[in-house]
Amino acid sequence: MKQLIVLLMVFSLLLAACGGEGQAVEPEVAVLPTQTTAPPATFTPLPPTPTPTAVPPTSTPIPPTPTASATPVPPTPTPVPPTPTPTPEPTATLPDGAAMTLLGIANSLVEDGAYEMAEVLYSELLQYDSDPMLYAYRADTYDKLGNFDAAIVDYQTAVDLGMADANILNNLCWDLAITGQAELALPYCEQAIAADPSAAHLDSRGVAYAQLGMLPEAIADFQAVVDDAGTPAAIASQRQEWLAALAGGSNPFTPELLAELRAETAVVTTTAIPAPDTAVSRSAVQQAAVEMGFIFGEAQTIEGKETAMGLYADGECMVTMGLMGPETGLTDAVLQAVNCSEDTQSGVVYWFMNTVLTSDREIAQAIIYMVEDVYYVIEGEKETTGTKDIGNVIFEVKSAEDGTVLELTAQFSE
């Protein structure tokens, strides 16, 4: 690897000596957000809100999609209360500013619909802080992913930790009701309505009432939903159908209808997806680098491995890249940035991690690594991060003491 680095630097100096003819346009590298820099282009953190941005389940229905997650579950005659996960005691502290940065990114991911990545970030934050708001945020992502059992546990935990927010109580009521646990749902429905007697909250209680055989009470709640001027037309039409059935002495809340309501609540279709191929093509990474502005020479054999070496230069800033292994698979890689700004350094590191990782969860872990460790190397507060396993890659970031050189190495498992 030392030989590779020496060759990279020689290669970079040779290309730089050739003048401006081959210089690339500055790549549009993503910049990891801190409290003083702009966030990556694909992640625009929003300021943390004082209350969760929970959307009442009845406000934005979508046509149900028959998936494995929508398999009808009949109402449980003797429901078993959900068991809240024991609240973990924080085992460590995050660097100054890191928690707010991760929270901002996670909230932004929710806005963008990247719920799985957001869930990873919320879960990471809960290792450091057992704030009930974090449980509520994560429960919202579980709802969107159709993981209602996990959402119920997190909403329950948030309530048990003292959150009395009407939206949280209503979401807990709704999730319990649509999973056939109406008896457990009803107390939370009542608490939500006591805090805010909105149409959405009455609607959730109506679902619980109907399953419990309290048809006149259910009719009163659904009628209030229909009469409310703010109820969307599609919701009002569906509730009118329920009212007609209930008025005729028929209960429309069959297992099939509950399955439809679960499908409407989850905005992400959860299907069985084969595990992605973790092999990373050297040629694909090289092509992505070329598109970012890197210039590559002919591949060479170094330490017994075929190696492609590339250069990106912008004024005094030079970024060299070495990709080792056959075209069909990377075995090792190294990035070295010399005399570059913090924004360029962090952007290149994040771009590379994002390019070689294969799943949303791994990319989320890379974000965490950047915020917790890598960025502090870039800022000169650390000289090395040690190593970090993400997916099938081991990353390590080092920096020169004066901050002029940043080096990222990656080793890929077979």
Image (cartoon, rainbow, N blue to C red):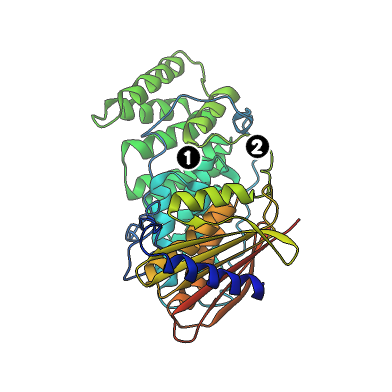
Q: Nearer the viewer, residue 268 or 303?
A: 303
Circle 2 is placed at which residue position? 273
Residue 252 - label = none
- For marks 2 and 1, the one nearer the N-term is 1
In the image, is residue 46 above or below residue 230? below
Residue positioned most to the top = 248
Name the residue: 48% across, 43% down.
Answer: 173
Horizontal side, residue 346 vs residue 304: left or right: left
**Residue kind at label 2, given as amino acid type:** Ile
Residue 158 x %, y %: 49, 59
Residue 55 x %, y %: 38, 43
Name the residue: 49% across, 86% down.
Answer: 401
Name the residue: 56% across, 79% down.
Answer: 384
Q: In which quarter of the image is the N terminus?
A: bottom right
Residue positioned most to the left = 229
Circle 1 is placed at which residue position? 174
* SS class, disc 1: helix
Query: Which of labels 2 and 1 is toward the front?
Result: 2
Q: Which of 323 and 71 is in front in this view?
A: 323
Residue 75 x %, y %: 61, 32
Residue 221 x %, y %: 37, 31
Name which quarter of the figure residue 106 lies in.
bottom left
* SS class, disc 2: loop
In this rendering, does residue 125 appear at all? no
**Residue kind at label 1, given as amino acid type:** Trp
Q: Residues within 10 Å of mark 2 (few under 14, many from 20)?
A: few
Find the distance from the CA under tag 2 to the CA under tag 1: 28 Å
In the image, is residue 368 above or below residue 41? below
